[in-house]
Amino acid sequence: MTTMTIAKAINEGLRATLAANPKSLLMGEDIGPLGGVYRVTEGLIGEFGPDRVVDTPLAESGIIGTAIGLALRGYSPVCEIQFDGFVFPGFNQITTQLAKMHARSHGNLTVPVVIRIPYGGGIGSVEHHSESPEALFAHTAGLRIITPSNPHDAYWMIQQAVECQDPVIVFEPKRRYWLKGEVDTAAPGPSGDPFKAHILREGTDATIVAYGPLVPVALAAANAAREDGHSVEVIDLRSISPLDFDTVTASVEKTGRLIVAHEAPTFGGIGGEIAARISERAFHSLEAPVIRVGGFHMPYPVAKVEEDYLPDIDRILEALDRALSY
Amino acid sequence: MGTHLPSTEFDGTAVDDQREADAEAVMGQPPAQMVQLLGPDGKLGADPVYSSYADKLTPEDLRGLYADMARIRRFDVEATALQRQGQLALWVPLTGQEAAQIGSGRASQPQDYIFPTYREHGVALTRDVDLAELLRQFRGVSNGGWNPKDTNFHLYTLVLAAQTLHAVGYAMGIQRDQKLAAAAGKAGNEPDAAVIAYFGDGASSEGDVHESMVFASSYNAPVVFFCQNNHWAISVPTNVQTRVPLSNRAKGYGFPGIRVDGNDVIAVHAVTEWALEHARQGKGPVLIEAFTYRVGAHTTADDPTKYRGSEEEEAWRAKDPLMRLEKYLRAEGLADDAYFAKVKADGDELAAYVRRTAHDLEDPDIRAAFANVYAEAHPLVAEELAWFEEYSAGFAGGDEPSAQHGAAAKAGH
């Protein structure tokens, strides 16, 4: 066991991947000598050279499109998109090309491209630097989407993403890059399957589902609720596509109440999908409507008011109160 | 290629004059500098660089180029007819562009990898793709149709220019393969390979073409950008896409740009062979602009009479790629009536094969679509397939609408 931050865990995960898989390579803007704007790739170009850690021109479509070509030639590229709001120039390549290549080739071609995207707010930044666009990608068949919330998962999930033969987008909770935790670099343990949700704490009165940057917030809310006498189960989704409905359904069948929290706007978001599925799967177990806690239907607001936008402990507790009031 | 803007002092008049000259050169009036070996009159000219490549073509090669062009034109006629008869949903004709496609495709080597648009039927022929398989996409039975690994001819790409980036990435992979082979002491075991990225004058406006040229140039990737300037992007002429000849754009990226007579199969073959050699030797990318013309419609859903005059089409028919090679072959005594009759008979045989096979293409099963969304198991796909099977089973033996309703409601569909 080693203590490290999420950023360092991803760095170590990438290092392990580059060392183990000679066909893997990293591509992105400023990921070479600078080590990326968040230093996630720090030191890697020195160890693996510029053919394996590739500083690219500033062109997101170019990064994804050439990564597809590299994958067709048998490589496993890991692309870094510098910030969530800058992925959109590459959106065409991701949705019309990357996601569909395996299907349209009748399975003859695989494109195991990994796309790392630092996402979410809470860092006081300028526009386009704090968004949560995961639902836009989850709606596209052919993509897998995962998001670690702690260093141990971060270390293993990036490696598992590279091993997966499907395209995987790894949304990295950028405001948690400096969150420290224990990492077992010898074995993934319960994190062996990146597409399974984890129950972080058990409870009986309600379930909170969260992922990425809101997992610590959900845990804090559950702790606060316990002081009020409520036993709250917390699930870290980990994977957004596929989504582990079995784990969520089993939890709701036990607790009868479900709150889904994410930073992304609630309208058209992952929370809505979970609410719909759970209402189908566990209708007779539900004691209250599924309640979503998320961003508002507005462009991500300016930094000075982002605290009013982002779900926090109180917003989750308010939702919990509503759920318990039924 | 034209002269370029003054770099030391700004001369507004010169800029305006150059801009006007460049704009006129876009459409070939007056003809810009262009590599041409075989003119519309069937006479073979000379070029200081490319004649040496053309000279390598044997009489058998030349007859083969003619036969390929004739076959693909016959195929095009057949596919158009199949669309008119309701056997295909859509067809994308290539007539007029045979020399650009056959000449470039025949210049490629088996180890090279080709990224086509959706009109490269002639290139497909040169890569030994079963032409009946090309029809799958247009018959609505596949979004692909062939296995690119068999022929190194990638699937058609319908989102304009997306494939140009795939081509550059693939070329970056070739570079890395060479380094890995060298590190393993196996340098030179495999023949050097290059990539061809096809696109058109319309797609040249797409940002992906720009990004692909930036990446290719930065990494010196072994890729040949082959732009078929067929003068029309559906209804919009090339001079709306560009104010300079497209081949001039290469200069801005720092690699050679060559305009070649796209209706001259000998020149296209020579220029492409040179460009592929250049790329394979590690000298970086090349842009080829094949100056040609889409004689027919953009697709069978298009009506060119709404946006261009028949006199323009007639002028281009006079530059027909097959006619000029036939003139040359006859004048040089390389082919006679019997040869051309045999080519025609072969074409008819191909057409009959394609017609027969198109009719026999089996309708796919949607279960195959479920199977290929992901390479690895995916619970949502599995769940939806299971629902579909249950729902479908409800129709087996005596329809029971209420039972089907129940299954649908249970799974939420």
Image (cartoon, coloured by chain):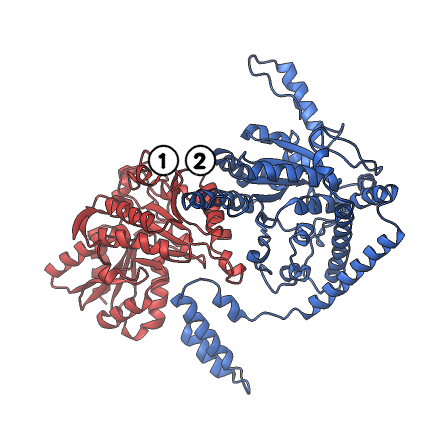
Above or below, A231 relative to A6: below
Query: Would you say residue B237 is visible in this rendering?
Result: no
Q: Position of residue A193 (x, y in %)?
A: 30, 62
Seen in the picture, residue A231 relative to B189 is either above or below; the reply is below
**Mark number for residue A57?**
2
- Marked residue chain, label 1: A
- Front residue of A122/B85: it is B85
- As helix, strand or loop, the secondary structure at mark 1 comes to loop
Residue A137: x, y in percent? 42, 53
Q: Quadrant of the C terminus of chain A?
A: bottom left
Residue ID at (24%, 59%): A188
Q: Position of residue B155 (x, y in %)?
A: 58, 54
Q: Please identify which colour was used for chain B in the image.
A: blue
Is B292 or A149 nearer to us in this picture? B292
Considering only order in the chain, which callout, 1 or 2, is on the residue closer to the N terminus? 1
Q: On the image, numbered disc 1 is attached to which residue? A: A30
User: Callout 2 environment at 10 Å: few (<14), some (14 to 19), or many (20+)?
Assistant: some
The label shown at residue A54 is none
Residue B220 left/right relative to B268: left
**The residue under label 1 is which amino acid type?**
Asp
Colour in which chain A is drawn: red
